[in-house]
Amino acid sequence: MFGRNALALAGILCVSFSAGLAADSYTELLESARATRKSASALVDAVNAGLDARDAARAASVDTAAAKVAVRDSAAVDTSAAPVRKAEKPAPAPVPPKIHPIGKPDIEMVLVKGGKFKMGCPGENEGCIGDERPRHEVKLGNFYIGKYPVTQKQWASVMGINPSHFDGEGWADLPVEQVSWNEVQEFIRRLNVMTGKKYRLPTEAEWEYASRGGVNGKGEKFSGHGFLDDIAWYDYNSGGKSHSVGVKKPNEIGLHDMIGNVWEWVDDWYDKNYYRESHVSNPKGPRRGMERVYRGADFGSSESHCRNSIRNFNKPGYRAINLGFRLARTP
């Protein structure tokens, strides 16, 4: 707008000079132009002031509307019930293991009279594998062995906790499981301190001799019986879980659950070729190794695996829901 006023003023001056106006007339004309410019400047200022006022009014209107929305939303939304983001949700507190009272457990033992027997796979058509052969003669002295696998209650009374997977109703009489060979050694150490006795794991030869009925063995296919359901929990009748010890029939010398329910750690290191060089009298297994042996099959084993001679093995720190143990003791 100032540009157009300046051009108009310049035009007037040019016309005036070209027309040869008198000095007074020129002075009057210049004053008139100046007055016109001032009027134009005032008009511009007024317009700008009006625009500023309009913008301020609009901004105030927007702020008022936003404030109303904020008030409405705060009234409609219960911030105390707002969902917590997953990242901010506190993690559940860990469940501490159940602590059991410590006390001397009652462990029933059976005296197994020494004798000799044929250890290993009894024939070519028994479904045996290589480490169960060759069948060889073994001679053993007298020893005690647990009437049942060690139960969860017995373990908890010595160790103060129960590591077993199947620990629901009736847990006290279920065989303890999820215990490694190394942890069993600590259990035995504490038990011996409590009782003053010298419990240990049975050797592999002792375990098989006892499972076959010792000197009273009748040569039955399974541990003391020809019908597996009478003496074992296995895949056909277990329902995929362990069961209370002592429910099934015992073998010839009164031992329960030697076959099925849970595998049982023994003391020996594993060597697939050990039977070829085993000692005849009271063999204790290889002098060294990487894995320890367990025997007897479990609740998930097929009938063909529920044989006295079957062997299994794993690292001493290995745990499983189908693996426990029973105790032995030298008289």
Image (tube, helix red, strand yellow):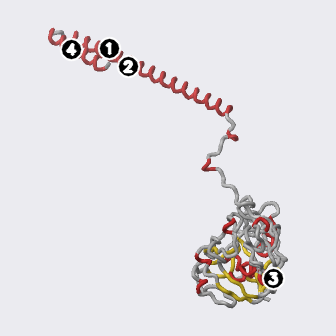
Give the CA separation, mark 3 to mark 4. 126 Å
Q: Which amino acid does label 1 sit on?
A: Thr
**Residue nearest the observer in this picture, 227 or 111:** 227
Q: Which residue position is annotated with label 3?
A: 194
- Which residue is nearer to you in this view: 64 or 260? 260
Where is mark 2, residue-wise? 44
Instruction: Give the residue displayed 65% in from the left and 79% down from the top.
Output: 120
Eyeballing the image, is 19 above or below 91? above
Label 3 close to label 4 by CB (< 8 Å): no
Q: What amino acid type is highlighted by mark number 3?
A: Met
Tell me if I can see residue 322 in this picture.
Answer: yes
Q: Nearer the viewer, mark 3 or mark 2?
A: 3
Query: How dense is the environment of label 1, judged by Cα within 10 Å: few (below 14), some, or many (20 and up)?
Result: some
Q: Which of marks 3 and 2 is nearer the N terminus?
A: 2
Task: Look at mark 4 in the image and give the residue it sits on.
Answer: 13
Residue 159 lies in quadrant: bottom right
Q: Is residue 279 rendered to the left or right of residue 217?
A: left
Looking at the rendered structure, which numbered label has been put on residue 114?
none
The type of residue carrying mark 4 is Leu
N-terminal label among 1 and 2: 1
C-alpha span from label 2 to label 4:
23 Å
Q: How many labels does the image show?
A: 4
Q: Are marks 1 and 4 in contact (CB under 8 Å)?
A: no
The quadrant of the image that shows the C terminus is bottom right
Asked whether 41 or 207 is in front, the reply is 207
Q: Is mark 3 on a helix, strand or loop?
A: helix
Front label number (1 vs 2): 2
Amino acid type of the residue that numbered disc 2 sits on in the rendered structure: Val
Q: Are marks 2 and 4 in contact (CB under 8 Å)?
A: no
